[in-house]
Each structure stands twice: as C-alpha cells, then as structure tokens.
Image: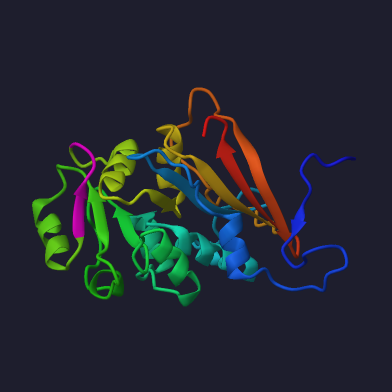
Amino acid sequence: MRSLFPVTDLTTTGAAAPDREWSLDELAEAYAYPADLPAGTSWLRANMVSTLDGAAQHDGRSQPISCAADMRIFGTLRGLADVVIAGAETVRQEGYRPARAREAFAARRAAAGQGPAPAVAVVTGSLDLDFSLPLFTEPLVPTLVVTGAGAPAERIEAARRAGADVVIAGDGTRVDPARVVRELTARGLRRQLTEGGPRLLGQFVAAGALDELCLTLSPMLTAGDAQRIAGGPGVAVPERFFLASLLEEAGFLFSRYRRTDS
C-alpha cells in the first residue's frame, strides 16, 4: 500500500542518521504559526491527544495517554503562542500553572515581538475558580479570565482583586467562542493555542473558529466512556481539514491538520 503522506520519524534525520530526539528549534520550525497573517487576524490551533479508541483522557486527565515526545511538542506549541486558552474544568483537573519563560524560545519570541511567555486565558461562565492558586498569584504575565457579561459580579471582582485580566466575551453567563477569538485578537494575542478540554474545543469547532488541529494519536486502548477530543452539539455539515504534517515516535503519531480554506 502506498502512503500519500510519508511519515517523518521524530528520532532520525534520515535513513543513515543515528537515533536522536528532534531539537526544540527543529520542532519550532515544524510547528511555526503562519508568517503571513493579515493585520487584525489571528490563528487558533488546538493541541489534543487521543487513544486509538477515541479517548481524550484516562481517569479525567490526559497525562496517562501521553508520552515524552508529546510533552516536547506540548512545550513547543506553548513556546510559540501568544495565549493558551483552556476551559475552567481542564484548568482544575490538570492543575494548570502559569506558563513559564523558556530560554530555548527567548530569541524566537523576542524576534516575533512576543513577551517572555504566553498568557493563560481561562474560559468560564461561572468563574468557579480558586484565585489563590499559582495560576493567578504567580504568573509571569497576568492570567486572563474570559467570561460573559452576566457572570456573577462578586466573582468578577474576586478575579480582578487576584490580578487577573477579565475579558468579557459573551452575553449573559455564556461565552461566545467566536468572540473569545476576537477579544483576544483585539488585545494583540494573535497566535492562539487551545488545550481544551473537549467541551471548549467542541464549541470552537461548532463556531467554525478553529484553524488548525495538532492531534497526538496514542497507541493505547482504554475502552470505558471517556470523552472524545471535542464534545457538545454536532455541526450540520462536517468541515474538511487537510493533513499538513505527520511525525512518528515509538508508535505515537503527531499529526497537524489545517482547514482547507486557511
């Protein structure tokens, strides 16, 4: 069977090359954001992991189905982003901490006019968050809390007292995913990365806001009833993405899909 897309092995540079890990610089080149984004626009990519049978989590967390190479790519995608977007449930379950400055990306970020680390934007309608956690008390850049105009006023005030930047991106208590993208873009946060969870990613998909999906396929089977990478209401017509790149290491596949009109 002929493969339409050759698989690039993360551990080699060619047939005769010794096994080695890809450097962070090589991964940064492979996962670079588009260089020709029109002014005032943004690029939203998602980074998710799934088992062979479609589970996005095991025991409520993604780490058990991940691997070291997946975490290198995870760190690379963060190192390239202006902002990391996550739902409140994911922030709680995964124990989110502030993004850190990494020397490996310092020159690249400076050349792109970026700060030393991406901001973290937490999407939440209720603001049911613990504002004493390091994500809010120790960020290198202020954490953003993205909510609706009808969110509880006392929780908005608590977020602001904790030093968070509150972003209104919806009416009532609901957050509009397309407006999330617009509001962050208006703040100059154009290179956007969402790490889920599945409900938030499903909302971006349903809104037609996702430009790129970086999906790690884990060579594991879990059965059970774990969530898929995207949840919520389905779309009327499935949207076609094309395969932009495919890497492999130890049976894990690291794919990158882009919208056909991007």
Q: Is residue 168 magenta?
A: yes
Residue located 46% across and 39% down the image: 210
Q: Position of residue 33 (x, y in %)?
A: 50, 50
Taking the view exactly as shown, the residue that stands out farthest to the top is 236
In the rendered image of this protein, does residue 93 appear above or below residue 44? Answer: below
Judge by depth and name the residue closer to the eye, 230 or 212: 212
Please report the bounds of the magenta region as a residue range: 165-171
Judge by depth and name the residue closer to the eye, 3 or 111: 111
Judge by depth and name the residue closer to the eye, 225 or 221: 221
Query: Could you tell whether 218 is left or right of 81 in the image?
Result: right
Taking the view exactly as shown, the residue that stands out farthest to the front is 111
Is any atom of residue 64 visible in this view? no
Q: Quadrant of residue 133?
A: bottom left
Q: Is residue 15 magenta?
A: no
Residue located 64% across and 67% down the image: 69
Colour scheme of this structure image? rainbow
Is any atom of residue 128 visible in this view? yes
Query: Could you tell whether 9 is left or right of 49 in the image?
Result: right
Query: Could you tell whether 74 is left or right of 188 in the image?
Result: right
Q: Position of residue 119 (x, y in %)?
A: 33, 61
In the rendered image of this protein, does residue 250 appear above or below residue 189? Answer: below
Which quadrant is the N terminus positioned in? top right
Q: Position of residue 43 (x, y in %)?
A: 43, 44
Q: Position of residue 125 (x, y in %)?
A: 24, 48
Total labels drawn: 0
